[in-house]
C-alpha cells in the first residue's frame, strides 16, 4: 500500500488545520496513523503532528498529498525538488506543481528557498544554479524555462488564525448584513493608516456602481488624501465617471435629482467620443476638458490604474487594455507590494484581482449582494472580510473615518 509521512507544525489546532487535513485524507479515500503529536499548552507555543498517510494507489496518494500540502503539510523527508524544462512557449511541463496563493518554499541544492510572488494557479520557475524561484503564469512560459514538477521538495506556509482579537480575525468569520458597519469601517480606516505607515500599498478595486450611487466624490477624496496607491477597474467605471464630470449624469440620470436627462441615454457615448477625440484621459485633463471625478483624481495624484476591457465595452476609452493577458500582466505587476485590498461593487474585477494576490494580503469585499461578498471573502480563511452594504454608504463612512484621522 503506498504511503508517505507528513508533518504539520504551528497553531494547527485553533486554526483548524489539523482536523481539516485529517478530513481531507479520509474524504479522498486514504487513511492515516498519527505517529507523534505534541500540543502547545500556551498561546505562544506551537503544536506538532507527524502523520503517516496510506492510500490504495499511487495516484490516490498523489491526490491526497497535493491537497494537504496546499494546507501546510510538509513531506517529512527533505527531498530535492524535481524539475523539467518547458518544451514550448505557453505550456508547463507535464506534472508541473500548481501553486496556491500561500507562501511557498522549494528545496533546491540542499536548501529551502522562498518562492517569490505567491500567486494561485501558477507554476514555479527556478534557476537550478542559483536556486532562485518565482511563480509564473502559464501565458508567460518560455521554451527552456525550468519548472518544479511533482510534490517533492515543496513546503507551503498555511495561514494561521491571529492570536489577537483584531478586525480580520474577529469579524472575518462570515458575511452578514447585521455586522456593526460603523465600527467596522473605522477599523478599516485604521488598517489603511497602518498600511501607509508600514509602506504597504493600498489597492482599490471598484465597479461602476460606485459612480451610479453617487459615491464617486467620496472615492475621489480618498484618493486625494493619499489612501489609494493603485486602482483596478474596467471601462464602465471610467466612462460613467467621465460622463458625470462632463454632463452631470450617470447612465443618463442626474444623480443629484434622480431624474432622466433629455437625450441622456447618449451621454455615455458622447463622453467616450470626447475623450477619444482628445487622445485619452490624461490629454483631456491637460486640455482642461476633464476637471473632476475619480479618473481626474487618479491622474492628478499620480496613482497608477488598470482599466481591463470586456466584450461588452462601448468605445472603449483609449486607456482601456483590451488584451486580457496584457491587462492581467499589468495588474500582476502593480499588485506587487500590496498589503491591503479594498474591493467595492465589482465581482468580475475583484475575483480577477483576488486570484493574483498572495493569501496574506488583507482583503475587504464590499457589495450589496451577500453572495458576491461571500464569493470574494472565501478566497482565504482569516485574511478576508466581507461587508454587505451599498457602495455609497461604505465609501461615505470610510471617507469620514479617514478625514477624522488626518
Image (cartoon, grey):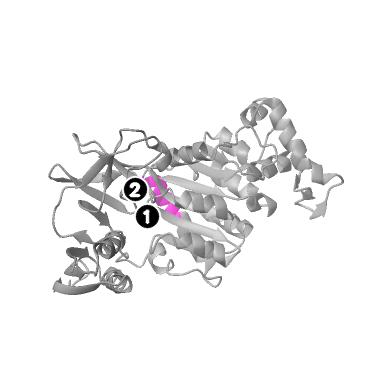
User: In the rendering, at what x and y percent does residue 172 appear?
Assistant: 43, 66
In the image, residue 15 sits, relative to residue 343, either above or below, namely below
Which element carries disc 2, helix, strand or loop?
loop
Q: Is residue 41 among the parts visible in the rendering? A: no
Quadrant of res 28: bottom left
Q: Earlier in the sequence, mark 1 or mark 2?
A: 2
* Residue situated furthest right in the rendering: 262
Q: Which residues are magenta?
A: 190-198
> Residue beneath label 1, please?
359
- Decide if residue 125 is on the left or right side of residue 54: right
Q: Is residue 252 among the parts visible in the rendering? A: yes
Q: Nearer the viewer, residue 369 or 89?
A: 89
> Residue beneath label 2, please?
118
Q: Nearer the viewer, residue 295 or 174?
A: 174
Q: Residues within 10 Å of mark 2 (few under 14, many from 20)?
A: many
- Decide if residue 211 is on the left or right side of residue 199: right
In the image, residue 131 sits, relative to residue 284, either above or below, namely below
Amino acid at each position: 500500500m503506498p504511503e508517505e509521512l507528513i508533518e504539520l507544525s504551528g497553531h494547527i489546532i485553533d486554526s483548524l488545520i489539523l482536523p481539516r487535513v485529517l478530513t481531507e485524507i479520509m474524504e479522498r479515500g486514504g487513511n492515516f496513523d498519527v505517529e507523534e503529536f505534541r500540543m502547545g499548552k500556551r498561546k505562544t507555543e506551537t503544536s506538532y503532528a507527524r502523520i503517516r498517510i496510506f492510500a490504495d494507489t499511487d495516484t490516490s496518494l498523489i491526490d491526497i498529498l497535493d491537497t494537504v500540502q496546499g494546507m501546510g503539510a510538509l513531506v517529512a523527508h527533505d527531498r530535492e525538488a524535481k524539475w523539467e524544462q518547458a518544451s514550448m512557449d505557453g505550456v508547463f511541463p507535464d506534472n508541473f506543481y500548481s501553486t496556491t496563493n500561500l507562501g511557498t518554499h522549494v528545496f533546491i541544492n540542499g536548501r529551502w528557498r522562498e518562492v517569490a510572488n505567491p500567486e494561485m494557479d501558477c507554476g514555479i520557475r527556478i534557476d537550478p544554479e542559483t536556486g532562485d524561484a518565482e511563480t509564473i503564469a502559464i501565458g508567460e512560459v518560455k521554451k527552456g524555462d525550468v519548472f518544479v514538477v511533482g510534490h517533492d521538495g515543496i513546503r507551503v506556509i498555511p495561514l494561521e488564525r491571529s492570536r489577537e482579537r483584531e478586525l480580520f480575525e474577529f469579524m472575518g468569520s462570515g458575511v452578514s448584513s447585521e455586522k456593526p458597519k460603523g465600527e467596522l469601517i473605522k477599523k478599516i480606516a485604521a488598517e489603511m493608516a497602518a498600511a501607509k505607515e508600514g509602506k504597504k500599498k493600498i489597492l482599490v478595486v471598484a465597479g461602476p456602481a460606485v459612480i451610479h450611487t453617487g459615491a464617486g466624490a467620496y472615492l475621489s477624496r480618498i484618493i486625494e488624501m493619499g489612501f489609494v496607491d493603485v486602482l483596478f477597474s474596467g471601462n464602465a467605471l471610467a466612462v460613467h465617471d467621465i460622463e458625470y464630470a462632463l454632463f452631470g449624469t450617470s447612465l443618463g440620470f442626474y444623480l443629484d435629482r434622480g431624474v432622466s436627462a433629455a437625450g441622456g441615454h447618449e451621454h455615455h457615448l458622447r463622453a467616450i467620443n470626447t475623450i477619444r477625440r482628445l487622445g485619452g484621459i490624461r490629454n483631456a485633463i491637460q486640455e482642461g476638458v476633464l476637471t473632476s471625478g475619480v479618473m481626474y483624481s487618479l491622474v492628478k495624484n499620480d496613482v497608477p490604474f488598470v482599466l481591463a476591457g470586456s466584450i461588452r465595452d462601448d468605445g472603449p476609452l483609449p486607456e482601456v487594455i483590451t488584451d486580457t493577458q496584457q491587462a492581467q500582466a499589468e495588474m500582476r505587476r502593480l499588485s506587487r507590494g500590496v498589503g491591503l485590498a479594498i474591493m467595492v461593487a465589482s465581482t468580475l474585477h475583484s475575483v480577477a484581482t483576488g486570484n493574483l494576490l498572495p493569501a496574506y494580503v488583507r482583503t475587504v469585499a464590499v457589495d450589496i449582494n451577500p453572495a458576491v461578498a461571500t464569493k470574494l471573502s472565501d478566497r482565504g480563511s482569516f485574511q478576508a472580510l466581507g461587508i454587505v452594504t451599498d457602495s455609497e454608504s461604505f465609501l461615505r463612512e470610510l471617507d469620514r473615518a479617514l478625514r477624522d484621522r488626518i
